[in-house]
Image: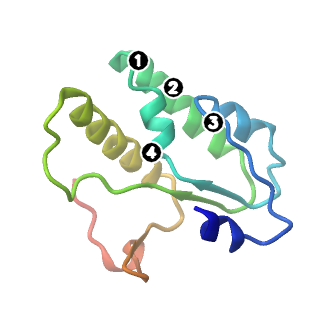
């Protein structure tokens, strides 16, 4: 974590909104670039919500992002490649994180997959699966 923070430019500002990511995004200047690193903590913080409340929360997040006029980069942990979670809460996290990633991708100008220091532009290389 220390190295990760040290690589950031000095002019970057850090926000740690916890559960209130949508509110934090709305408070940021829409004409300034924004990096959200990453969504796993946000998803985990809302595992106590029922499905309906989770969908509403995610929609609020998406709407806050749609108000932005400058690039927003969102890091999303890929959860579908690992083992099947052994616990109900682990499965819920995987399902919600994957669903949220799919919802956000529908609004993204580009989607990138970064693995082992290499980046692939999925918007150019991938075929959308219905």
Q: x, y percentage for residue 10?
A: 84, 69
Q: x, y percentage for residue 25?
A: 71, 41
The tag earlier along the polypeptide, 2 or 3, is: 3
Q: Which residue is mark 1?
A: 49
Which mark lies nearer to you, 4 or 3?
Answer: 4
Marks 1/2: CA–CA distance: 9 Å
Marks 4/1: CA–CA distance: 15 Å
Marks 2/3: CA–CA distance: 10 Å
At x 44%, y 45%, the residue is 40
Q: Quadrant of residue 127?
A: bottom left
Badge 3: how crowded within 10 Å, few (<14), some, or many (20+)? some
Q: Which residue is mark 3?
A: 21
Marks 2/4: CA–CA distance: 14 Å
Badge 2: how crowded within 10 Å, few (<14), some, or many (20+)? some
Answer with left or right where residue 11 lies relative to residue 7.
right
Which mark lies nearer to you, 2 or 3?
Answer: 3
Answer with left or right where residue 61 lies relative to residue 80.
right
Q: Foreground residue, 71 or 43?
A: 43
Q: Foreground residue, 3 or 85?
A: 3
At x 51%, y 37%, the residue is 42
Residues at badges 3 and 1 in contact (C-beta under 8 Å)? Answer: no
The tag earlier along the polypeptide, 1 or 2, is: 1
The tag earlier along the polypeptide, 4 or 1, is: 4
Q: Quadrant of residue 1?
A: bottom right
Residues at badges 1 and 2 in contact (C-beta under 8 Å)? Answer: yes
The tag earlier along the polypeptide, 3 or 1, is: 3
Q: Which residue is mark 4?
A: 40
Q: Which residue is mark 2?
A: 57
Badge 1: how crowded within 10 Å, few (<14), some, or many (20+)? few
């Amino acid at each position: 974590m220390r190295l990760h923070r040290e690589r950031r430019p000095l002019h970057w500002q850090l926000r740690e909104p916890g559960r209130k990511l949508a509110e934090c995004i709305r408070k940021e200047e829409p004409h300034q670039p924004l990096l959200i690193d990453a969504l796993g903590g946000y998803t985990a913080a809302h595992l106590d919500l029922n499905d309906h409340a989770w969908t509403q929360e995610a929609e609020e997040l998406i709407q806050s992002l749609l108000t932005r006029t400058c690039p927003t980069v969102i890091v999303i942990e890929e959860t579908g490649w690992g083992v099947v979670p052994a616990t109900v809460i682990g499965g819920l996290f995987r399902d919600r994180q994957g669903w949220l990633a799919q919802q956000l991708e529908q609004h993204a100008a580009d989607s990138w997959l970064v693995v082992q220091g290499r980046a692939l532009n999925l918007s150019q290389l991938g075929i959308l699966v219905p």
